Structure formats: structure tokens, C-alpha cells
Amino acid sequence: MPRLQTLAVHAGTRQPTPDYHPVVPPLNSSVAYTYDAMVDLDAVFADQAEGYVYARYGNPTVAAFEQAAAALEGTSAGVAYASGMAALHAALLAAGVRSGAAVVCAADIYGATYALLSRLLAEFGIQSIFVDINDMRTVRETVASLKPAAVLVETISNPLLKVADIPTLAEVAHAADAQLLVDNTFATPYLCQPLAWGADMVIHSATKYLAGHGDVMAGVVLCSPELVQKLRENQKLLGANLAPEPAWLAHRGLRTFWVRVREQFANAERVADWLVARDDIVQVHYPGLLTHHQHELARRLFGERGFGGMLSFELRDAGRDQVFGFMDELQLVLSATTLGDVFSLVLYPAHSSHRSMPAEMRAALGISEGLVRMSTGIEASEDIIADLAQALDKTRA
Ligand SMILES: Cc1ncc(COP(=O)(O)O)c(C=O)c1O
């Protein structure tokens, strides 16, 4: 019988594999895996047998989340990361973005994605050109002349809610041997599966709608089983892995994804319609509005499923002080730097999501000092609207 000191370490561990199945995937936080025979471990190392050897190479809890996210995006392969930014970086590297290569990116893009390309990757000799993704002529000319390794867009853009014509962009990218990478964080697979429209990789900040409760930071890249090999290889070396605990939480969140986003998206439509009717709001950006420039495109890509849970709007004659005043008056809607949660949230792009974008570029894109971005939660739409109304009324007074 081993001594107590030894039992303290080993007792209860390495239980034989049971012949029952837990209904909910268990949280498996083991870093390493042991086998009855060394040859079995060797076979897993050599990819000749299924299994796990070391958590940076793969983990069952993370794999369960990857499978679920991949299924929602209509594929069977994906790799999860510690954040959406880590996922974006991994997708760019796997697409062949290297020193001397170019990236054509939508100008209307999340601020940190802009900074990753324009600052960090620029230091590695990667050239990024930012284009208006709805100006298809310029996109075609830029992609054809630059021959980039990747074209990167958001299905629905942050924060101006522009919609990308994914099938046409896929054709343009592929004609130049570039991969089309689509950040589907705002649209989610509820509205659109970019891989089915020809994209090569789909990226999510799973921190947002996929996990959905504001308590997990995670990212995921979904793609074909062929492309996933490169992501896995790089993951083993770069190690921006999603840990088992947040993977487990994200997977739990994913199980209610469909019902959450259905409510959130319906609430956004109601809030957008209500905002349009107010005379203290100059402009409402929401693809569901008939006045939105890509409303028809959104209908074509999203079918009858809706237009998302994100909108942005501009307060009339307002600068930063008035917008801050409005945000401070909100009682139910939270002023916080995230989106896609069950709570309704507002954010001021000029000082948070797009802080790292130069002020001139923000102004040129239309990210004005009066712009507020909103993510609708699952509260009753009447309560969300009442809160917006009282805060707007006080701001006007
Ligand atoms: C559209 C979009 N993509 C990517 C990211 C980055 O995700 P994360 O914060 O999980 O790194 C964000 C974050 O807000 C985002 O809005």
C-alpha cells in the first residue's frame, strides 16, 4: 500500500473509462494524458491514432466546443483560441500572411483588427490596404493588382453595420489566389454561414454571441478539414490556446445560442424602428432598415432570419460630452466595452472599440463623435426602449 503522501497525489485519479456517457460534456482540465503502453502514446503523437497527449496540442473539453462551433458554421473543423484577436491572428498566419505579403482589409473593421494589421503586422513587413468593402470596383482593382495572401472582412461591420457581399468577395479573392477570411462575430451563424458563401475561414470573437453571457473570453476559427491542419500546426508552436475552463463555459453558452440571438435580434429591430422615429437621433445604422445601403444584400445573405442584434446611432448635434451624458443617464442598458451578451449594452466607439484608429480615419469612415454603438440583450424590448427614452429625454433637456 502506498504511503499517505503518495495517495494524496494519486488517489482517485486515472479512473478507468466508464461505459456511461455524461449528458453534459465534463470539464477535463488535464494538461497531459497517459496510455497503458508507450506505443499507444507514440501513435497519438504521430497522428496515427485519436487521442490527446498535451493540452497545447488538444484537449477534449476544448475539442467539444470546437466541434459545436464548427457545426454551427456548417463545417467539421475548427480551432479555438484564447480570444477573438488570437483567432484573427491565427487565421491570417494560416492564410499565408508573411513578411512581403499583403492583406486587403475592409476599412470599416474592429479597431484592434485595424491596429493588428496597420501596426503590429506592418512591423513584420506585411502591407495592409484598407478599402471600402462596398465599393466593389476598388476592391476588385486592389485585389487584382496587389495579389494579397488574404482578404479580410466582417460580415456585418463594427461599428457602422455595413454588410459584406461575401459570395462576390470570395470570387474576387480566389481569382487572385487569396483566401477570404470573414469575421462573423456580429452576424453569427444564425444569420449567415460565410463558408457556404465561399469564404475560406470564419473567425469569431466567441467572447460575444457564441458564449453570450459576458463571462468568457474566447475566439475560434472554422474552416475545412484541410485548412485546419495549418491552424493546428501553428497552434502547437504559438500556444494561444483556449483553456478548458472558458471552453467549457463557452460550450455551455452555445447551447442556448439559438434562442438568445433570436430574442436579441428581434429586440434590435424594434429598437432601430423606434430610434428612427426620434428627432434627436440623426442616423440609425441597422441593416434591417429599408434605408440601409445594403438592406437588399442583407436580405439575400440572411434570408428571413433577421438583421442582427447590433446597431449604431448618432445623437443630433452631439459631441463626446453629450454622448457621455446620455450614457451616464442609462439605468438598464449598460455602458460597457463588449457586445453580444444577454444584457443590453452601449459603447462609445471613438474612445473604446475604435480608439486605436486615427481620428481622421474614424471621421472619414463616419465614426463620428456623436456615434453610439448598441448591442441589444434579451430583456423585454419595452424596458430597453423606456430606458433609452428617459436617457435621451434627459440629455435633450
Ligand atoms: C468584430 C470583432 N472581431 C473581433 C473582436 C476581438 O475579440 P476579442 O475581444 O474576443 O479578442 C471583437 C471584439 O470586440 C469584435 O468586435
Image (cartoon, grey):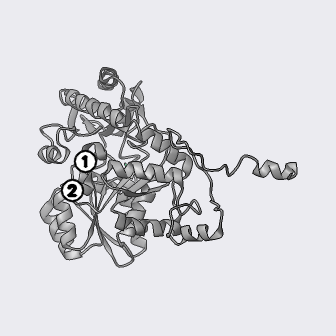
Give residue 261's position: percent from left, percent from top: 32, 36
Q: Tell whether circle 2 marks a residue whose Cβ is less than 8 angstroms from ligand 1.
A: no
**Judging from the image, what secondary structure is the residue with disc 2 in?**
helix
Give residue 33's position: percent from left, percent from top: 62, 59
The amino acid pointed to by label 1 is: Cys
Label 2 or label 1, whichever comes before in sequence order = 1
Report which quarter residue 348 is drawn in: top left
Q: Would you call the spot at circle 2 few (<14 residues within 10 Å), some (14-19), or many (20 or more)?
A: some
Could you say which is closer to the camera, residue 116 or residue 179?
A: 179
Q: Would you call the spot at circle 1 few (<14 residues within 10 Å), some (14-19), or many (20 or more)?
A: many
Q: Is residue 18 left or right of residue 339?
A: right
The amino acid pointed to by label 2 is: Trp
Image quadrant holding the C terminus, namely top left
Report which quarter residue 307 is drawn in: top left
Q: Which mark is residue 197?
A: 2
Give the vertical position of 330 relative to 112 (above or below).
above
Give residue 157's position: percent from left, percent from top: 27, 50
Give the vertical position of 80 relative to 19 (above or below).
below
Whether label 2 touches label 1, CB < 8 Å: yes
Question: What residue is rendered at 51% in x and 43% in y?
Answer: 25
Give the vertical position of 364 relative to 382 (above or below).
below
Residue projecting furthest to the bottom = 100
**Judging from the image, what secondary structure is the residue with disc 1 in?**
loop
Question: What residue is rendered at 26% in x and 48% in y?
Answer: 156
Q: Which residue is mark 1?
A: 192
Could you say which is closer to the camera, residue 99 or residue 302?
A: 302
Residue 118 in view here:
no
Could you say which is closer to the camera, residue 111 or residue 265?
A: 265
